[in-house]
Amino acid sequence: MKAFRIILSTTVFLLISCTFSMAQCAMCRATVGSNLSEGRGVIGTGINDGILYLLAITYLSIPTLIFIWYRSAKKEMNLKLKLNR
């Protein structure tokens, strides 16, 4: 039951934070558009770098968490096998 509550609260938190992050997209687009029309492309480059950073962190964190889960599950399975002998 405790694991269910943790998963449920994590899911709700992620759904709520997703709404806030999606609201920023329109603001970033407007900022980049106004700066590019004025001839300044530095802010657009910075925003693109930030987007790539967020993308890389997401795609690196998921395999890392899977690897940690796999390693701990393997250790637990080996421990159970040793106890059964």
Image (spheres, grey):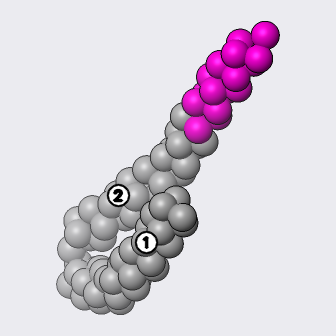
Q: Position of residue 35 (x, y in %)?
A: 23, 81
Give 5 or 42, whichever is nearer the viewer: 5
- Choose mark 2 or mark 1, whichever is in front: 1
Check disc 2 and report its element: helix, strand or loop.
helix
Residue 68 placement (x, y as % from top left): 54, 34
List the residue tagged with mark 2.
Answer: 49
Was residue 19 drawn as part of the magenta stretch in this picture? Answer: no
| Identity, as a three-letter code, of the amino acid under mark 1 | Ser
Is 40 situated above or below 56? below
For the point 47% across and 68% down, which residue is it? 5
Disc nearer the start of the sequence (2/1): 1
Occupied quadrant, residue 39: bottom left
Amino acid type at image mark 2: Asp
Circle 2 crowding by C-alpha within 10 Å: few under 14, some 14–19, many from 20: few
Q: Which residue sits at x=65%, y=19%?
A: 79
Per the model, the C-alpha gap separating discs 2 and 1 is 31 Å
Magenta-drawn stretch, dominant element (helix, strand or loop): helix
Secondary structure beneath label 1: helix
Q: Can residue 7 be seen here?
A: no
- The boundaries of the magenta stretch are 69-85
Q: Residue at x 70, y 16 (%)?
A: 83
Asked whether 1 or 47 is in front, the reply is 1
Quadrant of the image for the N terminus? Answer: bottom right
> For residue 43, which quarter of the picture?
bottom left
Above or below, 41 relative to 76: below
71 vs 27, left or right, is right
Q: Which mark is residue 63?
A: none
**Most extreme residue toward the front, as rendered?**
84
- Would residue 39 appear left or right of 66 to someone viewing this image? left
Residue at image position (28%, 87%) is: 27
Residue at which label 1 appears: 9
